[in-house]
Amino acid sequence: MHKYLTRLLTYSLLLGALPAVLIGIISYYIAAHDIKDKVNEANEQLLAQTQLRVEQTLRSMELSAMQFANSSLVQAAMDKPLTAEDFMEVRSLMTELFQLQTQTIINQAYLVNLEHNWMISHQALDTLWNHPESAEFLSYARNGRDFFWSSVNLDSIGKAPGSEEEEAPEKPADMIRLVQKIPMIPGSTTPKGLLVLQISAADIKSLLTPDNVLGTQYILDRSGSAFLSPVEEMRRYEAVNLRISSQVSRLSEEGAAGLEPVTRFFYSELTGWKAGITYRTSSLNGWTYVSVVSVADITRESSKIAWATVLASLLILAVVLLLSLLGTRHMYRPIRRLLEFSKRVAPADGRDRTGRNELELIQESLQLLSASRNQLDKEMESQTAHLKEFYMLKLFTGQMSDDEYLRKSAMYGFPAEWKSLGVLSLQIDLLPDSRFQEQDRELLLFAVNNMVVELLPPHSRFSPILLNDSQVTLLALTTDDPEAGKAMLYSFAETVRSKVEQYLKLPVSIGLSRPFAQLSGTVNAYGESLAALKARINLGTDIIVHYDDFMVRKGSGSAVYSRLKLVEEQLAQSVRELKPGKAEEELREYMGMLLDESSDRAEYHIPLLQLAMRLLEIAQEQGVPVSQVLEGEKEIQRFLRLQTREELLLWFQTRLFAPLIQLLAERNEHQYTNIAQQMADIIHSHYDKELSLESCAAMMHFHPFYLSRVFKKEMGITFSDYVAEYRMNMAKILLETTDLKIAEIGAKLQYKNNSAFIRSFRKVHGITPGQYREHAEKGGSPANDAAEGGEKP
């Protein structure tokens, strides 16, 4: 064992150490020769990044200038003079100039009109000839290009113009200007106007790569002048700048000026040191970006790389040694575990195994495990029936592939010689018509499943199973002819149905799928057999239906839907009117139309469920909770499992109509009482105002006819009679308890005139209001006096 570990460790060390040493030596020489190229490449990238940063700013200014110069506002201003009286247009132009300043780093902008002698800046409107830079602007107009960049030194303003085409200034530029002629006509020296955008040279210098420890970066203009550099730096790199200018000029003459910018490099001897010069010429404005790096600084890194290579190699050797130790132990770990496991499973027979090879012990243990597996296989055979059912469940639920079936078919004795397959689904019909109860359904399905196992030979069927509320069997057919396969399925189904009827006295229906060739079609065929069973809704119970026959029976009842909706509304109205007998007749008519004339009888539950929801809406409209009508979600699930017409009719009659009509009747009775009481309260509180049935209905948000009928039913008197009677009673109280005049009381009780009030009072009480008050004040009985007064002529 130790010798094996030693060999593994030696091999691992050699495999890891030799490449590490060789790579270290080679990498040092490669790094020493390539370090210069790498640094130069880094400088090139930095220089390219610097150029991109600068040109991004410049291009942004050019785009802003183009958009501003071509705007309709500027084009219109170029054709006329502007004075202080045109302050609205001047303010618009100044606003646009200020917007240019907010978009980029522009610190000043000038819009110059050469024809009409005016100019606008960020500060004000002025005449061109009065401006100190008028000569500078005129020189821009004479320039042959219509779009160019120019550098300006503040000391030169008011003296000789300084542009990039002229002689280089002695001092660095303070400002950089973008000049665009308006309009842009190539070669024109007499434009209408100029747009001049100005930025600070310090802003451009800030875009150069900062803190470049390997060298210096600066920019040359078209004339080869380092217009942004200090005077000392100009003189230090004067020879370099001349060489760069000559190379750029030569390349321009050779036709390379319009090409993409190319980075070029050369070495140059400066005062006391050697430098590497990298430069790129821009195709945008002809500027040349230059980077100067000391060669001594580049080569100084070689020694550092040498030390770094040595340290890296030593570190790699240490890591290789550590990984070799860990890897060797890790690779030997499975063998050690197998050896320990073999010792645990080896029989305790007292034999000495100390001198035997570890692999021999492992082999002996594997032989023992193989023997145990064979014994386990024998025990599994006793559970084959349950395993068969398990795999059939997987097949019918789409969890078994054809490949898995091929592996399991021989083990579990599934049929192998078949040309097509078919699915038989059996369901028990109505139990109330038999000697069994609903709670016996599962036991009966189990008994039927056992009968199928005995009735059908094993070579013609797979293991029968119970799936949901059905007994399902996958049949193996010996023919691939559809008609012959259909006949075989009918024969098997008739055998099962007749034997179940004979021995269990139980009505069952059987649905048959179409024959199919691949096991992967089992799930679809199972669905076809269940769909065929839905024909019981039309054909009745105790039947055998093939899926093809079920599909043929479908008609073209597209016009039935509108008639169904009409009957549905009639049925809903019958429920509202609490007429259960009429509702039951209309339900039978509805189901007859749905099941006998509809084109899609397989989905009959959907319109029936819509009908149930429509009736439940009636309960909700009357304020009756749905939970009081149906027993929650379980009742809906029970409804969806109903398969025959008789079951559906019974469910609607007992589970929906009866409780719904009872609850609506109770609700209506209670509601009528509340409505009548509310109407009486309105009369009591509004008797002294104009009151009608229509105004009362408006306050209660009901129809006047409905309120009239409810009030008459609950109070036994019409609304108008009740109002008149209550007002007469209130008239007696007012006569007894107040000093109001008879006319005032009549007006208060909404009588049009005093005579009408007196007539009505006398008609009810037999005496006039005055006589009633007189007798009431005397303490007599107004009723007795009314009787006496009634006898007077």
Image (tube, rainbow, N blue to C red):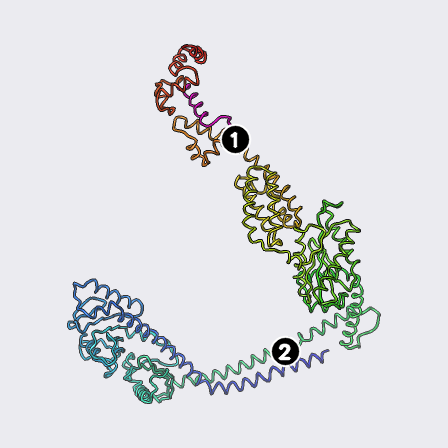
SS at circle 1: helix
Specify start and end residues of the magenta stretch as a single range: 714-734
Tell me the quarter of the picture where residue 290 sits: bottom left
- Residue hosting label 1: 673
Against 286, is 389 above or below? above
Q: In this orientation, which residue lies closer to the viewer: 336 or 608?
A: 608
Which label sits on residue 324? 2
Local SS, label 2: helix
Q: Is 175 one of the magenta-colored residues? A: no
Q: Is residue 6 left or right of residue 708?
A: right
- Does any portion of residue 225 appear in the rendered image? yes
Residue 474 at x, y percent in the picture: 72, 61
Callout 2, which amino acid? Answer: Ser
Q: Earlier in the sequence, mark 2 or mark 1?
A: 2
Q: Nearer the viewer, residue 290 or 710?
A: 710
Residue 318 against residue 95 in the figure, above or below: below
